[in-house]
Image (cartoon, rainbow, N blue to C red):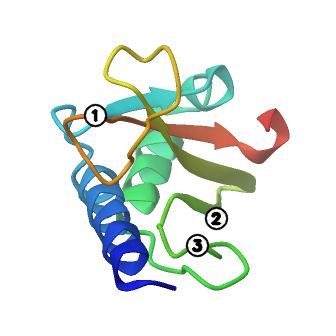
Amino acid sequence: MSLIAKTKRDRIRELNDALRTTIDPKLGKIVLTSGVESLPSDVRARAIRKTATFNAFTPDNDPHKEHDFGSFEIAGQHFFFKIDYYDAKLEFGSEDPADPEKTARVLTLMLAEEY
């Protein structure tokens, strides 16, 4: 991997971690699927917190080392979170996910069965 590619990958991971750990709407959009929305509020809150504190990234669930996907269980439910990269208008994929000026991040928290 070239130094430029590694630097971009590291920047993508940094931006993804910032969105995921802060759930700050200034850093991206947060989407809860209808399945997550329908859960009791305490379970939903625990799932959001687990997403923010998730750190079990491995080569199996994070092969590109971007911290853009995770899975976990809470209250008998299996959850996935996924971060996708769009252009600023949310119409197309981002041409450069390492550039926050060109990229709108969308973190989706879903039940695994909704995937």
Helix, strand or loop status at disc 1 = loop
- Residue 64's tag is 3
Amino acid carrying label 2: it is: Phe
Dividing the picture into quarters, in which one does residue 87 lie? top left
Depth check, front residue: 92 or 43: 92
Amino acid carrying label 3: it is: His
Depth check, front residue: 75 or 32: 32
Q: Is residue 97 left or right of residue 35?
A: left
**Mark 2 or mark 3: whose residue is earlier in sequence:** 3
Crowd rating for badge 2 (residues with CA inside 10 Å; few <14, some 14–19, many 20+): some
Whole-percent x, y for residue 114 in the image: 79, 33
Vertically, is 59 above or below 36?
Answer: below
Query: Which residue is tagged 2?
Result: 72
Q: Marks 2 and 3: CB-CB under 8 Å?
A: no
Task: Please report the residue visible at 39 percent of the width from the left and 79 percent of the height from the top.
Answer: 6
Looking at this rendering, what residue extends furthest in the left direction?
Answer: 26
Task: Please report the residue visible at 52 percent of the width from the left and 29 percent of the height from the top.
Answer: 32
| Separation of residues labelled 2 and 3 (CA atoms) | 19 Å
Crowd rating for badge 3 (residues with CA inside 10 Å; few <14, some 14–19, many 20+): few
Q: Disc 1 vs disc 3: which is toward the camera?
A: 1
Task: Please report the residue visible at 52 percent of the width from the left and 85 percent of the height from the top.
Answer: 1
**Mark 1 or mark 3: whose residue is earlier in sequence:** 3
| Separation of residues labelled 1 and 3 (CA atoms) | 20 Å
Crowd rating for badge 1 (residues with CA inside 10 Å; few <14, some 14–19, many 20+): some
Q: Is residue 86 left or right of residue 20?
A: right
Task: Please report the residue visible at 77 percent of the width from the left and 46 percent of the height from the top.
Answer: 112
Query: Which residue is tagged 1?
Result: 102
Q: Disc 2 vs disc 1: which is toward the camera?
A: 1
Vertically, is 90 above or below 77?
Answer: above
Whole-percent x, y for residue 25 in the image: 21, 32
**Mark 2 or mark 1: whose residue is earlier in sequence:** 2
